[in-house]
Image (spheres, helix red, strand yellow):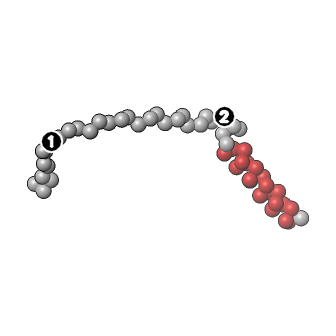
Amino acid sequence: MKTLRILALFATAIGGVALSSCGCCTGVEGAPALRPLPQFNDIATPGAVINYAK
């Protein structure tokens, strides 16, 4: 009888997690898709030498 009670509690916990984690039962919408990253152009710096040791 104790084993049945433990299994029932375990099944209830697993069922609760399974039903609430998908969002369909909670009414919470999923996150929107990310927008594409911007495309940057390289800046031409001919002959520019930067001395970071100053």
> In this orientation, which residue lies closer to the viewer: 35 or 19?
35
For residue 9, which quarter of the picture? Answer: bottom right
Image location of residue 16, percent across then percent down: 73, 48
Residue flagged by tag 1: what amino acid is it?
A: Pro
In the picture, the quarter occupied by the C terminus is bottom left
Residue at left offset 55%, top offset 37%: 31
Residue at left offset 49%, top offset 36%: 34
In the picture, the quarter occupied by the N terminus is bottom right
Residue at left offset 12%, top offset 44%: 47
Q: Residue furthest front?
A: 46
Task: Tell me which label, 1 or 2, sits earlier in the chain.
Answer: 2
Q: Is residue 34 left or right of residue 3?
A: left
Q: Residues within 10 Å of mark 2 (few under 14, many from 20)?
A: few
Residue flagged by tag 2: what amino acid is it?
A: Gly
Q: Say which of marks 1 and 2 sits in front.
A: 1
> In this orientation, which residue lies closer to the viewer: 19 or 46?
46
The residue tagged 1 is: 46
Q: Could you tell me if the residues under marks 1 and 2 are in contact, i.e. CB atoms within 8 Å?
A: no
Image location of residue 25, percent across then percent down: 71, 38
The residue tagged 2 is: 27
Q: Residue furthest bottom?
A: 2
How many numbered tags mark residues here? 2
Circle on res. 20: none
